[in-house]
Image: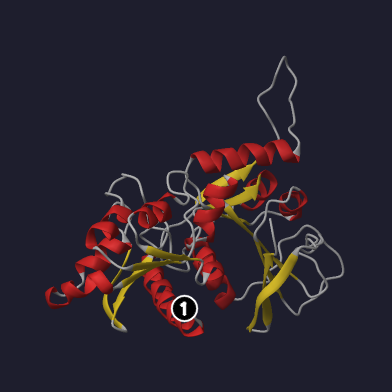
Amino acid sequence: MANQRAEDEKYMRRCLQLARCGEFFAKPNPMVGAVIVARERIIGEGFHVCCGGAHAEVNAFASVAVEDAHLLKEATIYVSLEPCSHWGRTPPCADLIVSKGVNRAVVGCIDPFAEVQGRGIIRLREAGIEVEVGVLEEECRHLNRRFFTYHSLHRPYITLKWAQTANGFIDDCGNSLAISTPVTLMLMHKMRSENDAIVVGRTTDEREHPQLTVRHWVGPSPVKMVLTHKTEPCQGMENELTDKQVLDILMKAAHDSGVQSMMVEGGRKTLQSFINNNLYDDIRVETSPQCVEKGTRAPELPGDVNVVEQQSIDNNTITLYRRTKI
């Protein structure tokens, strides 16, 4: 049993490697990798290349050589995400697996998408295929954390980002402060390219007119979203929304627009409002060795985050915090 588990984890890691190849073109679909193994040898493998294209399982079966086709009846298929069981742009992968007559299926994690959610597993088991679920589940879920958050919590995966001095200020008495270096700025733009949307507050937008593009990297720029508490005047009076109302509106708009990931780069008030309303998943803080006598204090970190990564670049320290649970 221990040997089988080690074998399953080995091939699931290969699934994860393959899945990452679809990082930029699979979305809004999840990244998925599939590996077909027979007689301790990989006879087929594939990944979901792009949205609307063939799924990982389809590409894996297509890669099986003609001379190896007879091995499918004794093969195990490994898939990082539960095979789909519904008709979308492509036919159900669960039906394809059944039709190929494989002996066993190993699945990394259940698909949270409403039209799947365990139905693919049921379809395989009803066909007499042995199914193992949950191999490297945490790693498989983390790979598609944006997809999972979007479908499970009905909001984007949210990353808060700010830069601060060594003594905890984000500006110098209201004046902008150059904290990032050319290299860390480039990395921040890389991070922007990996997110669907970017949020700033109205004050930051009006005062600094940030471009919020990926001009120091390559890839698509995120959609710009600006928070405002003002509503349309009613009977000659302006109404002002609460932080919670504003963020509720933002979350609904983002979800309705298919935004699966969001960066927040606003000032302290905007960032702290996300923290106070429990809307965060990752928090990226860049700290420089410089100090200022006074200015705007950096937001207060919440208590339910852990440090998952820390690196020193050009004497600045970049710390990535991740929420321990939702």
Of the 4 image quadrants, the one containing the C terminus is: bottom right
Residue 28 showing in the rendered view = no
Question: Is 274 on the left or on the right of 105, as rendered?
Answer: right
**Label 1 amino acid?**
Glu
Residue 305 or 140: which is nearer the viewer?
140
Residue 55 or 21: which is nearer the viewer?
55
Say how many tags the image has. Answer: 1
Q: Residue at x 17, y 77 (%)?
A: 68
Identify residue for label 1.
9
Q: Residue at x 27, y 49 (%)?
A: 91
Q: Position of residue 123 (x, y in %)?
A: 37, 52
Q: Quadrant of residue 230?
A: top right
Coloring scheme used: secondary structure
Q: Position of residue 207 (x, y in %)?
A: 67, 49
Q: Residue furthest left?
A: 66
Q: Residue at x 47, y 78 (%)?
A: 9
Q: Position of residue 155 (x, y in %)?
A: 58, 47
Q: Residue furthest top?
A: 235
Question: Is 292 on the left or on the right of 125, as rendered?
Answer: right
Q: Quadrant of residue 228?
A: top right
Q: Residue at x 58, y 38 (%)?
A: 252
Q: Residue furthest right?
A: 293
Question: Is 194 on the left or on the right of 99, as rendered?
Answer: right
The kind of secondary structure element at disc 1 is: helix
Compared with 49, 76 (above or below) is: below
Residue 154 showing in the rendered view = yes
Residue 119 or 228: which is nearer the viewer?
119
Compared with 85, 2 (above or below) is: below
Q: Position of residue 146 (x, y in %)?
A: 52, 57
Other residues around mark 1 within 10 Å, as few (<14) / some (14–19) / many (≥20): some
